Amino acid sequence: MTTSDAPQPQSRLPFVFIVTTVVLDAMGIGLILPVMPDLLRELNQMSISDAARWGGWLSLVYAVMQFLCGPLIGNLSDAYGRRPVLLVSLLAMALDYVVMALAGSLWLLFVTRMIAGVTGATYSTASAYLADISSPKERAANFGLVGAAFGMGFIFGPAIGGFLGELGTRAPFWGAAILALVNMGFGWFILPETLKPENRRAFQFSRANPFRAFLRLRHLPVVGGIILIYLIETTATNVYPAVWAYFTQERFGWSVAMVGVSLAAYGICVGVVQGVLIRKILNRLGEYRTAIFGMSCSLVSLLVLSGVSEGWVVFAFMPLMALSAVTEPALSGIAANRVGEDEQGELQGVIASASAIGTIISLPLMTQLFGSFTSETAPVYFPGAPFLAAALLTVLGLGLLVRARRSTWG
């Protein structure tokens, strides 16, 4: 092969762009997390318990729309390519943040969350993009790097959001809109299409049906089992975005800025785990044992958080919390290696829908638990109740994973 034919320099460009895309997307999400409790209390005078309940319903709307549209977006990317799906989603996301910045009522926030749920498929499309350019052996580790990029976004996003939140509850939304627009512009000039024509297939509405997508998994029992475990794990881990800002304000009296700092610190830990350690862990343990290890770390962390009374303990246990982030990339890698090259977008859409179902279950469950155990009428004051519930779910998922590994995958 001559020097002019060598593909190495250009072959890295899609990977670099996807990592950058996920970083910027996570920054946009992380920017708004610290300010949500204060924004809700500003729109309607309410307690932190009631704000958590409303915040849960807002997030639920987002998750429902993501579930309904996840397979649709995944199948569109299988039919028309990853590039147009990513760019259109980013533009709509930017416009959505602008509307959120201008919203003056709760109902308008609900509308914006619906739109955000539809456009929030960039993560699954980015995963399908990575599947296009990765060998089967590299996929689990590369999915881990996507998670690391997401963690990097949380290093910067919440910290900036906490700072901007001190300037005003609307400032982070303007910041998120700018990031999404910059990201779209970057992709317009740099992003190449990686889905080869021979790997495309005609779009079918039947395959875009989120419920029928799950029914098709009955013919792939191993993948179906992985998706079920993925759903349970997502339900448990969604306790963090569901109640973190409310829990830390209530339990430790943290300011918006301090909430942002804590999320940024967690992002640093996740970035180290998924960007550096996950390859070592996968090479040493394999995909199945890595998933078991990650869920075990999650269980211990959740039990500690359920009874924590000092803020410094949260920071002390963040490395262990971050190690649990190896679970989902390991499960995604197992599933991706068991479907065809022309089904990667569909699979990632199903995974996104499973994640959305977990979120749909988790958000009202965790926020209502938090509200019930922190309100003035609570039978027992127990702000850590959501974390205990998440720990019990993790026990269930871990048991299913061990049993499936012994009976089916061993």
Image (cartoon, rainbow, N blue to C red):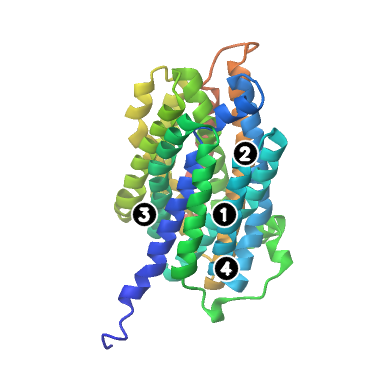
Q: Quote the CA–CA distance across marks 3 and 4.
A: 35 Å
Secondary structure, mark 4, is: helix
Instruction: Count residues near mark 4 (Cα–Cα under 10 Å), then give few for <14, some for 14-19, many for 20+.
Output: some
Residue beneath the point at 63% across and 67% down: 76
Which of pointers 4 and 1 indicates the residue nearer the eye?
4
Q: Quote the CA–CA distance across marks 4 and 1.
A: 21 Å
Secondary structure, mark 1, is: helix
Q: Quote the CA–CA distance across marks 1 and 3.
A: 21 Å
x, y (%) of residue 322? 38, 39
Judging depth in this view, the residue of 124 and 233 nearest the camera is: 124
Which mark, by number, is residue 101? none
Which mark, by number, is residue 84? 4
Give the mark, 3 or 2, whose residue is nearer the N terminus: 2
Label 1–label 3 contact, CB within 8 A: no
Position above or below: 196 against 334: below
Secondary structure, mark 3, is: helix
Circle 3 residue: 286
Q: Quote the CA–CA distance across marks 2 and 4.
A: 26 Å
Judging depth in this view, the residue of 243 and 90 nearest the camera is: 90
Residue type at mark 4 is Pro
x, y (%) of residue 78? 59, 70
Instruction: Count residues near mark 2 (Cα–Cα under 10 Å), then give few for <14, some for 14-19, many for 20+.
Output: many
Give the mark, 1 or 2, whose residue is nearer the N terminus: 2
Circle 2 residue: 59
